[in-house]
Image (spheres, rainbow, N blue to C red):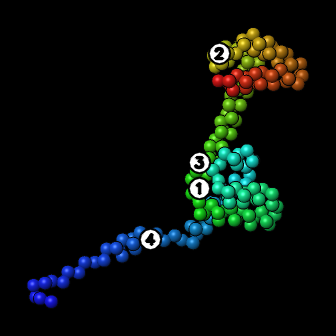
Protein backbone atom coordinates (compact mmCIF):
# COMPACT_ATOMS: atom_id res chain seq x y z
CA UNK A 1 0.00 0.00 0.00
CA UNK A 2 1.10 3.50 -0.70
CA UNK A 3 1.26 6.10 1.97
CA UNK A 4 -1.31 8.18 0.09
CA UNK A 5 -3.92 5.47 0.32
CA UNK A 6 -5.79 5.30 3.55
CA UNK A 7 -7.53 2.30 4.82
CA UNK A 8 -11.11 3.22 5.52
CA UNK A 9 -12.94 0.82 7.73
CA UNK A 10 -16.67 1.22 7.76
CA UNK A 11 -18.68 -0.63 10.30
CA UNK A 12 -20.65 -3.45 8.86
CA UNK A 13 -24.13 -1.91 8.94
CA UNK A 14 -25.88 -4.96 7.58
CA UNK A 15 -25.02 -7.04 10.65
CA UNK A 16 -26.14 -4.24 13.02
CA UNK A 17 -29.45 -3.80 11.19
CA UNK A 18 -30.22 -7.49 11.40
CA UNK A 19 -29.46 -7.55 15.12
CA UNK A 20 -31.78 -4.57 15.65
CA UNK A 21 -34.64 -6.28 13.82
CA UNK A 22 -34.53 -9.43 15.90
CA UNK A 23 -37.38 -9.32 18.35
CA UNK A 24 -37.03 -11.62 21.28
CA UNK A 25 -40.30 -13.20 22.34
CA UNK A 26 -40.56 -14.76 25.75
CA UNK A 27 -41.75 -18.30 26.22
CA UNK A 28 -44.69 -17.00 28.26
CA UNK A 29 -45.81 -14.73 25.43
CA UNK A 30 -45.66 -17.61 22.97
CA UNK A 31 -47.81 -19.69 25.34
CA UNK A 32 -50.31 -16.84 25.75
CA UNK A 33 -50.59 -16.50 21.98
CA UNK A 34 -51.11 -20.26 21.64
CA UNK A 35 -53.86 -20.11 24.31
CA UNK A 36 -55.61 -17.30 22.43
CA UNK A 37 -55.51 -19.34 19.23
CA UNK A 38 -56.95 -22.36 21.07
CA UNK A 39 -59.79 -20.15 22.39
CA UNK A 40 -60.43 -18.98 18.82
CA UNK A 41 -60.47 -22.64 17.78
CA UNK A 42 -63.03 -23.46 20.47
CA UNK A 43 -65.23 -20.60 19.26
CA UNK A 44 -65.00 -21.94 15.72
CA UNK A 45 -65.85 -25.48 16.87
CA UNK A 46 -68.92 -24.19 18.76
CA UNK A 47 -70.38 -22.62 15.60
CA UNK A 48 -73.17 -24.29 13.67
CA UNK A 49 -72.58 -25.60 10.16
CA UNK A 50 -74.43 -22.63 8.66
CA UNK A 51 -72.21 -20.19 10.57
CA UNK A 52 -68.96 -22.00 9.71
CA UNK A 53 -69.74 -21.61 6.01
CA UNK A 54 -69.59 -17.82 6.49
CA UNK A 55 -66.04 -17.97 7.93
CA UNK A 56 -63.11 -17.98 5.46
CA UNK A 57 -61.39 -21.29 6.27
CA UNK A 58 -59.14 -23.50 4.17
CA UNK A 59 -59.88 -27.21 3.70
CA UNK A 60 -57.49 -28.51 6.39
CA UNK A 61 -58.81 -26.18 9.06
CA UNK A 62 -62.43 -26.79 8.09
CA UNK A 63 -61.91 -30.56 8.25
CA UNK A 64 -60.19 -30.26 11.66
CA UNK A 65 -63.10 -28.17 13.00
CA UNK A 66 -65.73 -30.58 11.68
CA UNK A 67 -63.83 -33.48 13.23
CA UNK A 68 -63.59 -31.68 16.59
CA UNK A 69 -67.37 -31.22 16.56
CA UNK A 70 -67.76 -35.02 16.43
CA UNK A 71 -65.08 -35.95 18.99
CA UNK A 72 -65.65 -36.23 22.74
CA UNK A 73 -63.43 -36.09 25.86
CA UNK A 74 -59.63 -36.38 25.53
CA UNK A 75 -59.66 -36.54 21.75
CA UNK A 76 -61.55 -33.25 21.71
CA UNK A 77 -58.83 -31.55 23.78
CA UNK A 78 -56.10 -32.83 21.45
CA UNK A 79 -58.10 -31.77 18.38
CA UNK A 80 -58.44 -28.26 19.82
CA UNK A 81 -54.65 -28.24 20.33
CA UNK A 82 -54.26 -29.25 16.69
CA UNK A 83 -56.64 -26.54 15.51
CA UNK A 84 -54.60 -24.01 17.51
CA UNK A 85 -51.47 -25.29 15.79
CA UNK A 86 -53.10 -24.92 12.37
CA UNK A 87 -54.21 -21.37 13.23
CA UNK A 88 -50.60 -20.40 14.13
CA UNK A 89 -49.56 -20.84 10.51
CA UNK A 90 -52.45 -18.84 9.08
CA UNK A 91 -53.55 -15.23 8.88
CA UNK A 92 -56.30 -15.17 11.51
CA UNK A 93 -57.43 -11.60 10.86
CA UNK A 94 -60.09 -12.53 8.24
CA UNK A 95 -61.29 -15.34 10.51
CA UNK A 96 -61.64 -13.08 13.55
CA UNK A 97 -63.36 -10.38 11.47
CA UNK A 98 -65.93 -12.86 10.16
CA UNK A 99 -66.44 -14.27 13.67
CA UNK A 100 -66.97 -10.79 15.12
CA UNK A 101 -69.42 -10.03 12.33
CA UNK A 102 -71.43 -13.14 13.26
CA UNK A 103 -71.42 -12.19 16.95
CA UNK A 104 -72.39 -8.60 16.18
CA UNK A 105 -75.29 -9.73 14.01
CA UNK A 106 -76.60 -11.76 16.94
CA UNK A 107 -76.27 -8.75 19.27
CA UNK A 108 -78.10 -6.55 16.75
CA UNK A 109 -80.94 -9.05 16.53
CA UNK A 110 -81.25 -9.17 20.31
CA UNK A 111 -81.36 -5.35 20.45
CA UNK A 112 -84.06 -5.27 17.75
CA UNK A 113 -86.13 -7.86 19.63
CA UNK A 114 -85.89 -5.82 22.84
CA UNK A 115 -87.00 -2.72 20.96
CA UNK A 116 -89.98 -4.57 19.45
CA UNK A 117 -90.95 -5.98 22.86
CA UNK A 118 -90.87 -2.48 24.31
CA UNK A 119 -93.04 -1.17 21.46
CA UNK A 120 -95.49 -4.04 21.97
CA UNK A 121 -95.73 -3.41 25.71
CA UNK A 122 -96.27 0.31 25.11
CA UNK A 123 -99.00 -0.44 22.58
CA UNK A 124 -100.81 -2.81 24.96
CA UNK A 125 -100.49 -0.38 27.86
CA UNK A 126 -101.59 2.81 26.09
CA UNK A 127 -103.47 1.53 23.05
CA UNK A 128 -101.78 4.31 21.04
CA UNK A 129 -100.38 3.04 17.73
CA UNK A 130 -98.93 6.40 16.62
CA UNK A 131 -95.33 5.63 17.66
CA UNK A 132 -95.44 2.38 15.71
CA UNK A 133 -97.00 4.12 12.70
CA UNK A 134 -94.19 6.70 12.91
CA UNK A 135 -91.56 3.96 12.83
CA UNK A 136 -93.33 1.70 10.35
CA UNK A 137 -95.51 3.70 7.92
CA UNK A 138 -96.76 0.45 6.31
CA UNK A 139 -98.36 -0.68 9.59
CA UNK A 140 -102.14 -1.12 9.68
CA UNK A 141 -103.39 1.23 12.41
CA UNK A 142 -106.73 -0.52 12.79
CA UNK A 143 -105.18 -3.96 13.14
CA UNK A 144 -102.73 -2.65 15.78
CA UNK A 145 -105.53 -1.08 17.82
CA UNK A 146 -107.64 -4.24 17.65
CA UNK A 147 -104.73 -6.44 18.69
CA UNK A 148 -103.84 -4.03 21.51
CA UNK A 149 -107.40 -4.07 22.82
CA UNK A 150 -107.54 -7.90 22.73
CA UNK A 151 -104.12 -8.19 24.41
CA UNK A 152 -105.22 -5.85 27.19
CA UNK A 153 -108.33 -7.98 27.79
CA UNK A 154 -106.19 -11.13 27.92
CA UNK A 155 -103.86 -9.47 30.39
CA UNK A 156 -106.71 -8.35 32.66
CA UNK A 157 -108.38 -11.77 32.65
CA UNK A 158 -105.06 -13.60 33.27
CA UNK A 159 -105.24 -15.56 30.03
CA UNK A 160 -102.15 -16.66 28.08
CA UNK A 161 -100.69 -13.75 26.06
CA UNK A 162 -101.63 -15.13 22.64
CA UNK A 163 -102.49 -11.72 21.17
CA UNK A 164 -99.33 -10.14 22.61
CA UNK A 165 -97.34 -12.75 20.68
CA UNK A 166 -99.31 -11.89 17.55
CA UNK A 167 -98.47 -8.20 18.03
CA UNK A 168 -94.79 -9.08 18.40
CA UNK A 169 -94.87 -11.23 15.24
CA UNK A 170 -96.59 -8.43 13.33
CA UNK A 171 -93.98 -5.91 14.51
CA UNK A 172 -91.21 -8.33 13.58
CA UNK A 173 -92.63 -8.71 10.07
CA UNK A 174 -92.83 -4.94 9.76
CA UNK A 175 -89.21 -4.50 10.85
CA UNK A 176 -88.02 -7.24 8.47
CA UNK A 177 -89.67 -5.56 5.48
CA UNK A 178 -87.89 -2.28 6.15
Please say whether residue 121 is visible from this viewpoint. no
User: What is the CA distance from the residue labelled 3 to the residue labelled 2?
Assistant: 35 Å
Provide the residue designation for mark 4. 22
Element type where label 3 sits in the image = helix
Considering only order in the chain, which callout, 2 or 1, is on the residue closer to the N terminus? 1
Considering only order in the chain, which callout, 1 or 4, is on the residue closer to the N terminus? 4
111 with respect to 124 (left or right)? left
Quadrant location of the C terminus? top right
Q: Residue at x 81, y 57 (%)?
A: 70
Provide the residue designation for mark 2. 137
Q: How many marks?
A: 4
Asked if residue 91 is positioned above or below residue 29 in the image, the reply reads above
x and y, in percent, of residue 137 in the image: 65, 15
User: What is the CA distance from the residue labelled 4 to the residue labelled 1?
Assistant: 23 Å
Provide the residue designation for mark 1. 92
User: What is the CA distance from the residue labelled 3 to the residue labelled 1?
Assistant: 9 Å
Residues at discs 3 and 2 in contact (Cβ within 8 Å) = no
Dot 3 crowding, Cα within 10 Å, few <14, some 14–19, many 20+:
few
Between 2 and 93, the residue placed more toward the observer is: 2
Q: Residue at x 56, y 67 (%)?
A: 29
x and y, in percent, of residue 76 in the image: 77, 62
User: What is the CA distance from the residue labelled 4 to the residue labelled 3?
Assistant: 29 Å
Residues at discs 4 and 1 in contact (Cβ within 8 Å) = no
Amino acid sequence: MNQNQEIIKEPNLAVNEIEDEIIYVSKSEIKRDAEELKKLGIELVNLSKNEIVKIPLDEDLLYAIELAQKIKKEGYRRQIQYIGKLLRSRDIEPITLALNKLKNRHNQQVAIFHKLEKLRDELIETGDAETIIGLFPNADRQQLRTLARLAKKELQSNKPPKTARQIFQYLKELSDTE
